[in-house]
Every structure is written in structure tokens, then in C-alpha cells.
Image (tube, rainbow, N blue to C red):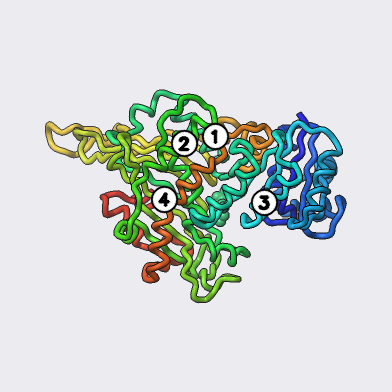
Amino acid sequence: MSFDLVFFGGTGDLTWRKLMPSLFQAWRHGKLPAEGRILAVARDDRDDDSYRNWLHERLQAADSAKRPTEDEYRQFAALIHYLRMDLSQPADYQRLKAWLETRRTDNTVIYLATSPHLFPTICGQLGACGLNHDGIRVVLEKPLGHDLASAQQINQAVRAVFTERQALRIDHYLGKPSVQNLMALRFGNVLFEPLWRRESIANIQITLAESLGVGTRGDFYDRTGALRDMIQNHALQLLTMIAMEPPSSADADAIRDEKLKVLRSLKPFDGASVARDVVRGQYRGGTVNGQLAKGYLDEDKVPADSRTETFVALRCEVQNWRWAGVPFYLRTGKRMADRHADIVVNFRPTPHPIFPGAHNANKLVIKLQPDDGLELHLLAAKGSVSSAGAGAMPEILSPVSLDLDFDKAFPTDRVGAYERMLLDALAGRLNLFVRSDEQEQAWRWVEPILDNWAHDSSTVRGYTAGTWGPPAASALVARDGFAWPEEA
Ligand code: BG6
């Protein structure tokens, strides 16, 4: 299969930090279809060679296992080309078209790694010069809009040119191996499904914690905040995968229909529930992994009086027969104690305790990063005898866990999130891409939070860099009698 992969935003951060390194790994693993061309598009005045050299320097920053050798880079770089374009100029799209038409290709994927406000212009121009035929797909990077209305506007402009199946909205969390395994765990095994409901599950906690701050992206981040950056997309997508009903098949739309139903079942927020169930925070100076870290307000390109949240914790409910009454807690933050993402499914206690002092410890931890794997926490008899009186059960139970490390289980087959998403885009596999109705529904759900925050300046809580967020986030969970994993 031959392909052409075009990156708009070819000199941007995303392209050199994530997309090109992932493509290189795909090439190194022999997964990139042969007969491929990769075209970086940007405004800078460069040619193929100077772009290849520029990229080479950047790929040297990767950790040693992922860095190309000279020989590897020489071969990989032969696939890479550069085209200078002004994205507002129709004539430049004609040059792109001419470049693409220099040969016949099975698949053309145009990846829009630019600021989303350019998507309508780019799509309009692509359509105007006929670069929207069946053989073309576009990949749209987040953030797709900053609220429902702007997301709808972008979607409308995209839909005017491309069909839904040609427009691939990327959420790279769906490409993470553990998220794939979540589908396998739930729908490839019979073990958990009977327990996967309100009768057996007490609560579910999704944590997406980062130890990094906003780095050089202060201006973007300040306009965005953690709710838009991580909750509206990544955290909600994980929630849909956990809560969805079994789809009728593995077909993309069968899966996306079920995910959409979950989003539609989320209990809507109002002023009272935003105040009660959503905590926002902003990091202050502190120490992260032994290094001093400045506070958010001292970061580059962040206004000194910013009220943008770098942390969110919230409690929500999925209102359907499976989940009614089960709290789902989502939290994310920058400059937290650790880089750590997982989903913890806490099961209910045994209905009738017969062991002295044993409190239920059943939980399933789906680990996304830094390692990916599964831990099933159980109680087991240690073999020692309790000092409880006559008639009491003598066993003392202790928590133990069954650990599955996917890196050890499948040492050679691991594929990173962006690598997986890029290969899926080239193959036209849509399962992991977000449909526009899902994305709009997610905006619809977060919008009351944004609106309430816009009118209430009193509730941005400071937290020290290197901690797990403001104490109010612990209180949110403690109120229901639960605790976050690090406090349990
Ligand atoms: C991006 C956010 O979508 O995800 C970033 O814009 C965040 O702010 C990143 O750092 C986290 O992704 P990962 O895969 O490193 O957890």
C-alpha cells in the first residue's frame, strides 16, 4: 500500500516532539507501509534537505533507545519532503495538489497539526482545489474549539468539505496500549462483565497527573486550562470506555454509538453542583521530584493575575441502569507529585464480613503510564493466626495484588499512542478516532462548568507544586466515604 502523509504545522512542537518521532518508530518497527512519502508543510523558507537536517537535530533530543542512528536517519529521511505554504493562499494549495499528483497513491492523509482556528480555512481551501476526494482523510488535532459553539463551527466547516468518515478527530489517549486493553479486558473476557455495574462497583477514579508544568506553552495553556486541555477530551474518553455498554461489533460506529450514549447519560451540571462537585486549582511554587518548581503565575507568558486552572477534580454520575448512584471521580493536574495516569475501579465490600478486621480491598487498577498494566487487588490469608477470641476465624487477611505488566507480557509488540493513531489513520481504521457528535456532547457537558467559573472568581485553590492538588480534592472524595489511591 502506498501512502502520502502531509503534516500542516510541519515545524510545530507537536510535529517534531510527537508525530515525527512516532513515525520514525513505526518505520523502525517495519510497520510503516512501504512506498510512503511524508510531506511537512510550513511557512518557513526551507527545502527538503534543510528540513531533514532541522528535524535530525530535534530527534537527537529523544532518549537513547528512541534516537535514530545516522544510518537509520538517512533511510528514514529519504521519505521526508518539505513544502513551503502560506495557508491562506489558494495558489499554494495548487502547489500541494501538484506535488501529490506527481504519483498515484492508495491513501493520502493530511494531518492538521496547526492551531484549530485555521481548520476551517485549510479545509475550505483543500475542498476548493479538489483535495477532498474519497482517497483523502484529514486528521484533526485537539483542541477542537474552546466551547460548544466554536467546536460546532469547526465541525460545520469540516463537514462542508469532508464526510464524517474522512475526518479523524484524534485523542491520543485512546491510542495508549492500556486503553486498547480496556476494550479487550471488558469485551474479550467474561470475567469482569457480570461485576461491571452498580451492584458490585462502589466508585471509579480516573487520574491523569503530570509532574511537568506548562513549560513554554504558557500563552496557549492560559487560554485553555485543565478542564479544556485534559477533562473535556482525554478524561471523558476514558470514562466512556469504562462505562460503555458492550458494542454490537468492533466496528467504529458501533463503538462510537455506545460511547456517545455514555456522554449523553452524564448527569448535567448546574450552578449548585459545579460549586459542590468540581474543584479547580492552580499550582504554587514547590518541589517536584527533588527539583524546585516555580508557581504557575511565575511561568513564562502567563499573566501575573491569571485565574486559569492547572488542576481539576470532579465528581460525576452516569445516569443509566448500569451505573446509577456510582460516583465517577476525574482528576488531572500539572506539577503534581508524579507523572502517573490510571483508572481505579473500587469494588464494594463483601456483603457479610466473616474475617476479623478484614476490610474489603478489591480493586482493579488499569495503569496507563508511566508503566502500562493491570493490577487486581485481593485479600488473601497470610497463614498467621489472629489473637481474636474463641469462635473467631483465626485467619488474618492481607491485601495482595495480581500484576500484569504488558511490557513483559508482549515485549516486542508495544506501540506508542501516536504511532498507533498514525498507523490507524493511514489504514483508515476509525475505531480510535472521536466522532463529531461525541466531541460536541463532551463540550455540551463541560460548558456549565466553564460558564459558572467565568462568573465566579472565588474558587481557584492554590496547591503546592509536587503535591496531589488542593485539599478540597481529597474532601470531594472523602465526603462519599472514599479516598484517592495515594490516600487509601
Ligand atoms: C495533551 C495536553 O493533550 O496531553 C498536554 O495538551 C498534556 O497539556 C498531554 O501534557 C499529556 O499527554 P501524555 O500522553 O504525555 O500524558
User: For this view, does 180 lie left or right of residue 382?
Assistant: right
Task: Determine which residue is flagged by label 4.
Answer: 445
Asked if labels 4 and 3 touch by Cβ distance under 8 angstroms, the answer is no
Task: Determine which residue is flagged by label 2.
Answer: 374
CA–CA distance between discs 1 and 4? 34 Å
Q: Nearer the viewer, mark 3 or mark 4?
A: 4
Label 1 secondary element: helix
State the image coordinates of residue 475 (x, y, percent, origin top left). Answer: 31, 58
The three-letter code of the residue at mark 3 reads: Ala
Tell me if mark 2 has few (under 14), some (14-19) or many (20+) residues whose alpha carbon lies within 10 angstroms of its own. many
The three-letter code of the residue at mark 4 reads: Trp
Q: Residue at x 62, y 32 (%)?
A: 429
Question: Residue 406's mark?
Answer: 1
Front residue of 266/338: it is: 266
| First in sequence: mark 2 vs mark 3 | 3
Question: Residue 113's mark?
Answer: 3
Tell me if mark 4 has few (under 14), some (14-19) or many (20+) residues whose alpha carbon lies within 10 angstroms of its own. some
The three-letter code of the residue at mark 2 reads: Leu
Q: Residue at x 49, y 35 (%)?
A: 256
CA–CA distance between discs 1 and 3? 30 Å
User: For this view, does 486 lie left or right of residue 391?
Assistant: right
